[in-house]
Image: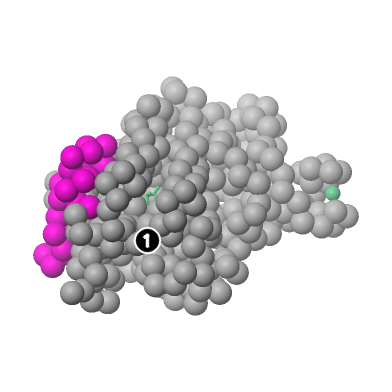
């Protein structure tokens, strides 16, 4: 009998690509997803007919128990995400949802032989940096009052001097400076701790910013690429926080999905948290330009010097450990953005909720104004 995988969140961006790849590799696939309205307008067209679909909430123990029947490998992708103002919902869905899933498998002695949980590079405090005097350093979060004054730099924690961003390895200090990050950290720790106690192998994959076709455009709080593309398509300029020179590790969704299959098929990363990303830093401004270029429109971003407290300045993943597993990002940014933009052009879901969302985020203090406007990097 072909092995059965449960993909929680399998209707979403990463989960659906993972489900497709599993089916191609000969797995039987079951999807548990509540079609969270923040992400979906009903059942998405891409849900594979070859997969069994359970529309259910990860917090619904009876539904999760039924979805776990006969499952060998669980890919736990379901989560509440982004920079939403809620606090309790993050904790309920991400932390408590994961806790319940783990208890069920343990207490009912279900024959799960591996669990892979979606963590995030958001668990780090700040990206690693190099100081010309002190070498590689792991600075803490930046100070809000300096950000408000338009000073976005990351200083060397020893001498306070200028630093250059460098790749962040898994043993960098973890932080959790946003509610989302706290709950991703909870999920990762709960899973790895449970794995040690039960002896069921598990891996936490710390994804970098993931993008590609099927990325929800309904959620204006997350998915910078979808947000920029939607605004540009409507003739609206992208809004860049800080000065737009902050960098991110952007990874094509097919590559992220592939990493899940790799860890499922190997024991070499069992018990570990593993970075999965492109290993390449791209500034948010450059990203906006690439998208505009692909769409054939002018970019002219809006830069008001606003910032989001707790957000990292530069973050690029060190993917050495994943590479040891045979992971290699296959789709570069230009190609990946091209695929996303082509897909988006075939959708009719360009509603721009960003303006409303921004107003809410400002009111709740999640986006903060800079007192002195835009500063140089
Ligand atoms: N996209 C990224 O850049 C990124 C980066 C790091 C980590 N992650 C993590 O990867 C995972 C997948 O993210 P994604 O980008 O595919 O997001 P997504 O929103 O496209 O998919 C998440 C899926 O989970 C479902 N879901 C949400 N709440 C649920 C609930 N209570 N019960 C059942 N299903 C629920 C949603 O309906 C959705 O289909 C998440 O755990 C996320 O935290 C994503
Ligand atoms: Zn120094």
Query: Could you say where residue 364 lies in the image, as x and y percent from the top left?
Result: 44, 23
Compared to 353, does 169 lie above or below?
below
Residue 91 falls within the magenta-colored stretch = no
Name which quarter of the figure residue 177 lies in: top right
Figure colour scheme: one colour
> What residue is drawn where x is 34% and y is 47%?
106
Answer yes or no: is residue 353 visible: yes
Residue 51 falls within the magenta-colored stretch = yes
What residue sits right under mark 1 in the picture?
114
Q: Quadrant of the N terminus?
A: bottom left
Compared to 212, does 85 lie above or below?
above
Compared to 213, does 103 lie above or below?
above
Question: Which secondary structure, mark 1?
Answer: strand
Given residues 188 and 12, the one toward you in this image is 188
Query: Could you say where residue 64 lies in the image, as x and y percent from the top left?
Result: 22, 45
> What residue is drawn where x is 51% and y is 65%?
269
Horizontal side, residue 182 vs residue 315: left or right: left
Q: Which residues are magenta?
A: 45-68
Query: Could you say where residue 290 lies in the image, as x and y percent from the top left?
Result: 46, 63
Query: Could you say where residue 33 lies in the image, as x and y percent from the top left?
Result: 22, 48
Assess disc 1: are there few (<14), some (14-19) or many (≥20) residues with their C-alpha within 10 Å of its C-alpha: many
Horizontal side, residue 126 vs residue 349: left or right: right
User: Residue pushed farthest top?
Assistant: 363
> What residue is drawn where x is 39% and y is 67%?
264
Name which quarter of the figure residue 144 lies in: top right
């Amino acid at each position: 009998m072909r092995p059965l995988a449960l993909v929680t969140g399998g209707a979403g961006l990463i989960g659906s690509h993972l489900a497709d790849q599993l089916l191609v590799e000969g797995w039987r696939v079951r999807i548990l997803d509540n079609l969270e309205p923040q992400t979906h307008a009903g059942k998405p067209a891409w849900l594979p007919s070859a997969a069994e679909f359970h529309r259910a909430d990860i917090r619904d123990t009876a539904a999760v128990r039924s979805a776990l029947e006969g499952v060998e490998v669980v890919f736990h992708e379901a989560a509440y995400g982004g920079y939403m103002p809620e606090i309790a919902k993050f904790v309920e869905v991400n932390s408590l949802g994961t806790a319940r899933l783990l208890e069920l498998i343990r207490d009912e002695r279900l024959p799960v032989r591996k669990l892979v949980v979606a963590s995030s590079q958001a668990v780090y405090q700040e990206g690693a940096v190099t100081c010309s005097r002190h070498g590689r350093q792991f600075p803490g979060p930046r100070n809000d009052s300096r950000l408000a004054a338009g000073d976005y730099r990351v200083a060397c924690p020893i001498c306070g001097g200028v630093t250059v961003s460098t790749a962040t390895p898994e043993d960098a200090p973890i932080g959790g400076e946003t509610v989302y990050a706290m709950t991703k950290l909870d999920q990762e720790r709960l899973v790895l701790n449970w794995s040690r106690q039960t002896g069921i192998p598990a891996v936490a994959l710390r994804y970098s910013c993931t993008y590609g076709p099927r990325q929800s455009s309904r959620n204006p709080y997350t998915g910078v690429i979808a947000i920029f593309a939607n605004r540009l398509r409507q003739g609206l300029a992208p809004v860049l926080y800080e000065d737009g020179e902050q960098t991110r590790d952007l990874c094509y969704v097919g590559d992220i999905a592939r990493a899940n299959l790799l860890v499922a098929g190997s024991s070499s990363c069992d018990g570990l948290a593993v970075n999965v990303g492109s290993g390449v830093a791209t500034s948010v401004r450059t990203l906006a330009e690439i998208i505009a270029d692909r769409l054939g429109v002018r970019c002219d971003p809006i830069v008001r010097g606003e910032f989001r407290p707790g957000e990292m300045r530069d973050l690029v993943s060190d993917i050495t450990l994943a590479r040891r597993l045979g992971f290699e990002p296959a789709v570069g940014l230009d190609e990946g953005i091209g695929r996303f933009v082509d897909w988006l052009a075939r959708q009719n879901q360009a509603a721009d909720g960003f303006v409303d969302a921004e107003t809410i985020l400002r009111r709740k203090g999640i986006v903060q104004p800079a007192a002195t406007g835009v500063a140089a990097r």
